Image: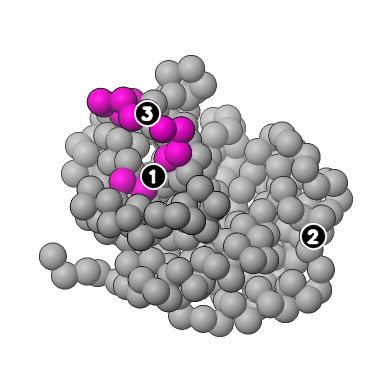
Amino acid sequence: MLIDIAANLTHESFHADVDEVITRARQAGVAQLLIAGTSGPGSEAAAELAARYSGHLLATAGLHPHHAADYNSAMGRRFAQLLQLPQVVAVGETGLDYFRDLSPRAQQIAAFEAHIELAIDTGLPMYLHQRDAHEDFQAILRVHRDQLGDILVHCFTDTRQALHAYLDLDCHIGITGWLCDERRGLELQQMVADIPDQRLLVETDAPYLKPRNLRPKVRTHRNEPQWLPWVVQELAQHRRQSIAHVGACTTANARRLFGFAVLES
């Protein structure tokens, strides 16, 4: 049984059929999902969805750097309340994104540091996003690392240098269907074997990043958690490990990091 540690099931593309999406995932062997909170309303919705599927779904609470300009003290207090719920198990999604720069960089940094304070206060793992912002991102993490618990760098797509910097900071690394892309995933394919078994996790980041190795091909742009096995398959190939080994390692890591319960067969 696999665990998808990044499913954006509160996204509008899932509003009409989220229950069917969850059912299809379970039928495909993706038994448990972590629902990412990326905004104020999105974090509320993620917590509610996880409560509906107790045992199978967990959630995070935070503000994606795209929305960092929306951050204020009231939102921070609400995130702190959500993080007290048993089904909300990580702080984020937070971090820095200089690729799109949808929020000013100063505000991204301020929101990121506010989330770090939440993680220090709660002791919960951090659920992080970084794109084209490695130097600032790792510098901020390095300052606070001794005060933080577990850290996940979700949807990793950066350089080998960045990967090893995060591993040196004792971070976990999430791999998505970016790996399955023959156009832009080649560099990632060459470095995933560097990730220790105990630091590796898998994710779909649905509805984004549908694996391009799906066979037969599916006529939709929307990614779903049911296609996580294709990421595992590709990951096993480039790590020169068995699919069963990669599945077992990543599931064990997700249980340890986020507290997913062991389900009965």
Q: Which mark is residue 49?
A: none
Q: Of the residues under marks 2 and 1, which one precedes in the sequence? A: 2
Q: Amino acid at mark 2?
A: Asp
Which residue is disc 2 drawn over? 70
In the displayed structure image, the side of residue 102 where residue 255 appears, left or right: left
Q: Give the CA separation, mark 3 to mark 2.
A: 35 Å
Which residue is disc 1 drawn over? 224
Q: Give the CA separation, mark 1 to mark 3.
A: 13 Å
Which residue is disc 3 drawn over? 219
Q: Of the residues under marks 3 and 2, which one precedes in the sequence? A: 2
The reply to whether the C-beta atoms of the residues labelled 2 and 1 are less than 8 Å apart is no
Q: Which SS class for mark 2?
A: helix
Check the picture and name the quadrant holding the C terminus. Answer: bottom left
Query: Is residue 218 a member of the stretch shown in magenta?
Result: yes
x%, y% of residue 218?
A: 33, 30
Query: Is residue 43 a member of the stretch shown in magenta?
Result: no
Q: Residue at x 52, y 58 (%)?
A: 10
Please say if 164 is above or below 17: above
Q: Which residues are the magenta region?
A: 213-226
Q: Give the CA separation, mark 2 to mark 1.
A: 28 Å
Q: Residue at x 44, y 24 (%)?
A: 181
Colour scheme of the picture: one colour
Q: Of the residues under marks 1 and 3, which one precedes in the sequence? A: 3
Q: Residues within 10 Å of mark 1 (few under 14, many from 20)?
A: many
Tell me which corner region of the image, top left, top right, bottom left or bottom right, holds residue 145.
Answer: bottom right
Q: Which SS class for mark 3?
A: loop
Q: Residue at x 42, y 64 (%)?
A: 257
In the displayed structure image, the side of residue 119 where residue 97 appears, left or right: right
Tell which of 31 and 188 is nearer to you. Answer: 31
